[in-house]
Image (spheres, rainbow, N blue to C red):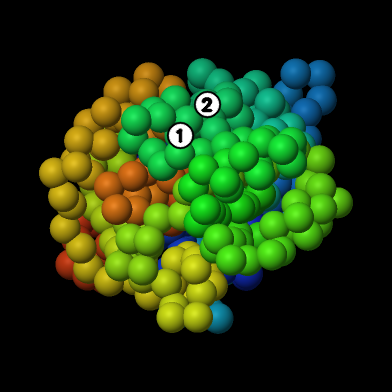
Amino acid sequence: MALDVAVQMDHVSSISIKGDSTFAMCLEAQRRGHSLFHYTPDKLSLRDGTVTVRGEAMELREEQGKHFTLGATEKRNLGDSDVVLLRQDPPFDMAYITATHILERVQPKTLVVNDPASVRNAPEKIFVTEFPDLMPETLITKDMAEVMDFRAEFGDIIMKPLYGNGGAGVFHIPPQDRNLTSFFETFGLLYREPFIVQRYLKDVRQGDKRIILVDGEVAGAINRVPAETDARSNMHVGGVATATELTEREREICERIGPALKERNLLFVGIDVIGGLMTEINVTSPTGIREVARFGGNDIAAMIWDAIEARL
């Protein structure tokens, strides 16, 4: 069954194929005989109820720097595609939200992965709060008095933007640090939204585990260990991926959230777990596929396409 697959992504020329999950998903689609059509979010248009895009037919290969060939630019009716992969990276801003509204117009004829309405309604750092017993103590606010009370209670805290990504703007503020008020003022200037404050988890020094779920079921995991000089474990900022096994507690977390993911048609999800506590549920553009494969784990790209083809 050859499918017409449209891929909404950051431009293919900008990706590093060694760790890019979108590249892995598209490469697997190509292996299965599906055709790929590449476009960037700014080429998405809605007119008189019809969604169109300007983009290019795309072919991929495992050669960084020579990893893609694009055809001539053409305009397509997105509703004529069988599948749309919603894969551009955050920030999760009004542009991202608007794109989810537009993509809803091609459903249900076209399968959008992940479901755009669910992506819009499940921001990574807010969706997780539906499971308070599975996560560390967390405050979402712009009220300085609340932040001060939270710090007085827990002492060692993490402060980060509510809609950030890739570890950007994440600060560890230990009890002796006198910069909290300054951080608060800076966040107030940079972000209109509330921000998030969490109890610092010392277990992060042993790693922040990325667990990938496909259609609500565990597909694989890697451990991301932060650099000695950094509080963040994101691989974008120097975190090192290592092989890992799931603990009983981590399997319990996955079993608890799996039905909620299936109910929302969130087919490809990555959760972050530190010391048995879940800190985020990533639904916009999860990563980790290639790292799992590199350590001998499942071929998650194949698992994703098995799930997509089963739905069609």
Residue at 70% across, 28% down: 102
Task: In the displayed orientation, state which residue is furthest to the left.
Answer: 248
- Above or below 41: residue 103: above
- Above or below 59: residue 78: above
Q: Secondary structure at mark 2?
A: helix
Quadrant in which the N terminus is drawn: top left
Q: Secondary structure at mark 1?
A: helix
The answer to which quarter of the image holds residue 116 is top right
3D distance between C-alphas at marks 1 and 2: 13 Å
Mark toward the viewer: 1 or 2: 1
Residue at 71% across, 64% down: 179
Residue wearing tag 2: 118
Task: Say left or right for 122 vs 222.
Answer: right
Amino acid type at circle 1 is Val
Residue 223 seen in render = yes
| Residue 122 coordinates in the image, percent (x, y) | 53, 30
Q: In the depicted view, which residue is nearer to us: 130 or 260?
A: 130
Residue wearing tag 1: 128
Amino acid type at circle 2 is Ser
- Above or below 157: residue 309: above
Q: In the depicted view, which residue is nearer to us: 156 or 159?
A: 156
Residue at 38% across, 61% down: 202
Quadrant in which the C terminus is drawn: top left
| Residue 9 coordinates in the image, percent (x, y) | 60, 52
| Residue 13 coordinates in the image, percent (x, y) | 62, 70
Residue count near mark 1 (Cα–Cα under 10 Å), binned few <14, some 14–19, many ≥20: some
